[in-house]
């Protein structure tokens, strides 16, 4: 790891801020715990932005510092790893490994895409298939990896139509990122948001509640993004020429031609499809049976790795779990607890104008969250920094903290400006014949205001109809 002059400057700025916070006379209204918390929070944020250090390492260091100084107890730090949402994510990854092992995802994608007869149909059928994967595979990087073989097969089948290949190379990561908001397990940032809301407000957003709010936004934003990708990467003449992609053609260009994409389902595929359908159905019907989603996921994971009915071995399924992400979530949740309990978050947002209109407050939150990927590349890190502050500021502005936190998290799903802004974008950018940084910038110039406006529209008009009012309800 090499530190440049820029890294040194960032560190000097961070330590200077910590030195200012350490002097009580500089901040007479701020307690010692709050000053310590702000110092640790500032150092962690600077490290996430500027230093070539793993995000999880930084988060664990920050959590350890807060526990060692007594701002939070060690029980609080370690208890975050036992949260139900952490178990939900672990079991969801084991289930996703079972789905991937059977080849069921490739068969479903081939079934949808082979029905396209026009370029626009191809784009929207691909979008629909990618949105559905949000229910089967947690985290955007996992979904991008699952979709990569399908894209490669399509790219080989369309090798003579370069603009269509570029269009698909942009479409896949774009939809993967924007459709993640459909489910609670779509991104680690969602679980961070849920935990912050629980710690700060006592509001627990479950799988069904998130699905009700997030799925409509995911569907609309993904299909609008598909149109934006079409218009920025292809010409009218490209879209007029029909496409003919059959299952046999996709089978021929698959990385593993032995994996069947048509014909009767195999025994393993049938079992896996039945298991996945049962788990998703139980998740969506939680208000009827009251079985927590984490427990449903654990039952499904146990069945998926069982010797008699499973399709993947336990150790192979556990290898797919992103343990660094889970540790990151646990440590940043502890940081959020420290910000709230020490009074640091309230102090940070205390200088905001008290009479800021609710709609203007939400505009600022969405704009900052949309642009935050230019500074913090990790989606989870962005939520760890922004959501505690947004929740604290919302009460002062008279805005429902749940609406504000969800708006910030949804807006943070846009991270398309640079190839390094998100892992799915970087993954597809490295492929031969893929898009250029200029193609990505052209798309982001259209997509950034479009997605921000759509999130604002949902939080002001759609979500209140679904039980999340904009204004804070008075007791």
Image (cartoon, helix red, strand yellow):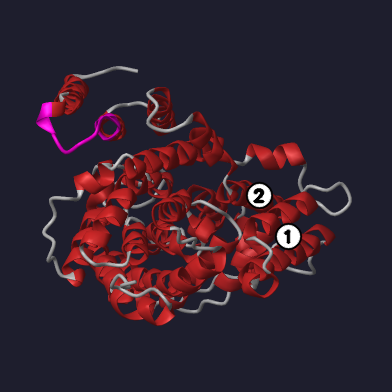
The residue sitting at 36% across, 26% down in the picture is 53
- Residue 390 in percent (x, y) is at 28, 55
Which quadrant is home to the C terminus? bottom left
Near-viewer residue (352 or 317):
352
- Residue 253 in percent (x, y) is at 60, 56
Foreground mark, 2 or 1? 2
Which quadrant is home to the N terminus? top left
Q: Is residue 27 magenta?
A: yes
Which element is circle 2 on? helix
Specify the segment rendered in magenta: 25-36
Near-viewer residue (96 or 205):
205
- Residue 357 in percent (x, y) is at 15, 70
Q: Which residue is mark 1?
A: 260
Q: Quadrant of residue 427?
A: top left
- Residue 419 in percent (x, y) is at 32, 45
Is 433 placed left or right of 90 in the picture? left
Q: Which residue is mark 2?
A: 91
């Amino acid at each position: 790891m090499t530190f440049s002059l820029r890294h040194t400057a960032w560190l000097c700025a961070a330590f200077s801020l910590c030195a200012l916070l350490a002097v009580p006379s500089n901040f007479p209204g701020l307690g010692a715990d709050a000053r310590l918390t702000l110092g640790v929070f500032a150092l962690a944020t600077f490290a996430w932005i500027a230093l070539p250090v793993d995000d999880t390492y930084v988060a664990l260091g920050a959590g350890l510092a807060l526990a060692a100084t007594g701002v939070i107890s060690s029980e609080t730090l370690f208890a975050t790893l036992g949260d139900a949402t952490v178990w939900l994510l672990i079991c969801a990854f084991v289930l996703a490994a079972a789905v991937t092992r059977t080849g069921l995802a490739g068969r479903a994608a081939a079934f949808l895409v082979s029905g396209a007869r026009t370029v626009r149909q191809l784009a929207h059928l691909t979008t629909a298939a990618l949105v559905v994967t949000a229910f089967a595979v947690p985290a955007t990087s996992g979904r991008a990896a699952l979709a990569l073989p399908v894209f490669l097969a399509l790219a080989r089948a369309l090798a003579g139509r370069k603009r269509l290949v570029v269009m698909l190379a942009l479409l896949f990561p774009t939809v993967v990122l924007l459709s993640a908001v459909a489910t609670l397990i779509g991104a680690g940032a969602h679980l961070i948001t849920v935990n912050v809301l629980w710690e700060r407000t006592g509001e627990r957003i479950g799988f069904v509640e998130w699905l009700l709010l997030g799925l409509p936004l995911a569907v609309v934003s993904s299909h609008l993004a598909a149109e934006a990708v079409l218009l920025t990467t292809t010409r009218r003449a490209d879209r007029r020429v029909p496409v003919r992609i059959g299952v046999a053609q996709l089978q021929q260009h698959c990385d593993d031609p032995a994996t069947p994409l048509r014909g009767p389902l195999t025994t393993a595929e049938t079992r896996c499809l039945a298991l996945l359908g049962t788990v998703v159905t139980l998740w969506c019907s939680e208000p009827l049976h009251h079985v927590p989603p984490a427990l449903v996921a654990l039952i499904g994971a146990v069945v998926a790795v069982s010797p008699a009915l499973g399709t993947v071995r336990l150790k192979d399924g556990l290898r797919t779990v992103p343990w660094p992400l889970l540790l990151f979530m646990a440590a940043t949740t502890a940081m959020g607890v420290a910000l709230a309990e020490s009074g640091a978050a309230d102090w940070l947002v205390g200088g905001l104008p008290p009479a800021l209109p609710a709609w203007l407050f939400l505009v600022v939150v969405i704009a900052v969250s949309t642009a935050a990927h230019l500074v913090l590349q990790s989606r989870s890190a962005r939520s760890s920094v922004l959501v505690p502050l947004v929740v604290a500021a919302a009460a002062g502005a008279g805005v429902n903290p749940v609406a504000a936190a969800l708006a910030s998290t949804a807006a943070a799903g846009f991270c398309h400006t640079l190839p390094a802004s998100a892992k799915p974008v970087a993954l597809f950018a490295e492929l031969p014949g893929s898009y250029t940084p200029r193609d990505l910038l052209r798309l982001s110039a259209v997509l950034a205001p479009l997605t921000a406006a759509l999130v604002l529209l949902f939080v002001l008009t759609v979500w209140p109809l679904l039980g999340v009012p904009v204004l804070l309800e008075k007791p």
